[in-house]
Amino acid sequence: MNTSSNMWWAGPLVLVLLRILSVEGRLAHAEVKKNLLVFRGARGMRLILGGEIIGLLYLIANGYRSEPGSAAALAGFVVLSCFAWPATITLSDAGIEKRRWWRKTIKIAWSDVCGIQRSASGDLGVFSKNGEGMDFSRYQVDPFRFQEEVMRRGKLDKVIDASAPPSLFG
């Protein structure tokens, strides 16, 4: 094992890439389809995950079998990448819907929305009166419009700051 690796730049590169994807999400706009607002994962995130999945499947199919566990490890990365695919959140006149290919669709009617919360990292959480909730990742497009639309349609007056210290006075 070589302890003097020249790969020191990989960690900072990944952090810069994540920051770029976060900024892309803030700058991109939601799609408007008839009376729907569609919030997808940032295009860069989808391209990276799609390229990774295709590249790893290519390696598995074309003989990356020199080590017994290498194909299994690559297949594991493919599965993890598929589960990391960003959700699609749709706002309609009826409410909010979050779809993922591997999970049950979450729906919250506007009359049931009771709160929206922003985490320290910039992710948003929407909560309903019946205890159901959904998250809106910082890697999804147009978070400011999402927040604005949820507050307007859900008739909310403030965003809860999850990173703020607790207060006795509200």
Image: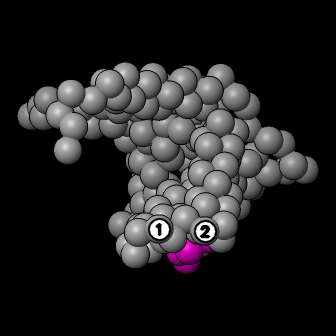
* Residue 66 higher or lower than 12, as above or below: below
Q: Which residue occupies 60% across, 51% down?
A: 52
Which mark, by number, is residue 63? 2
The x, y position of residue 95, in whole percent, is 64, 58
The x, y position of residue 34, in whole percent, is 90, 50
Q: Residue 55 is drawn in which quadrant?
A: bottom right
Q: Is residue 94 visible?
A: yes
Q: Is residue 137 magenta?
A: no
Quadrant that contains the C terminus: top left
Of all residues, the one furthest to the front in this rendering is 66
Q: Give whichever of 62, 95 is nearer the camera.
A: 62
Q: Which residue occupies 21% across, 27% down?
A: 4
The x, y position of residue 118, in whole percent, is 38, 36
Left or right, 128 with reference to 31: left
Left or right, 86 with reference to 125: right
Left or right, 76 with reference to 51: left
Q: Which residue occupies 65% across, 23% down?
A: 27
Q: Residue 151 is drawn in which quadrant?
A: top right
Quadrant that contains the N terminus: top left
Amino acid under disc 2? Gly
Indicate the secondary structure of the residue bearing disc 1. Answer: loop
The x, y position of residue 29, in whole percent, is 73, 31
Q: Which residue is mark 1?
A: 66
CA separation in Å, label 1 and label 2:
8 Å
Q: Which residue occupies 14% across, 29% down?
A: 165
Q: What residue range appears in magenta?
A: 99-104
Amino acid under disc 1? Ser
Main SS of residues in magenta = loop
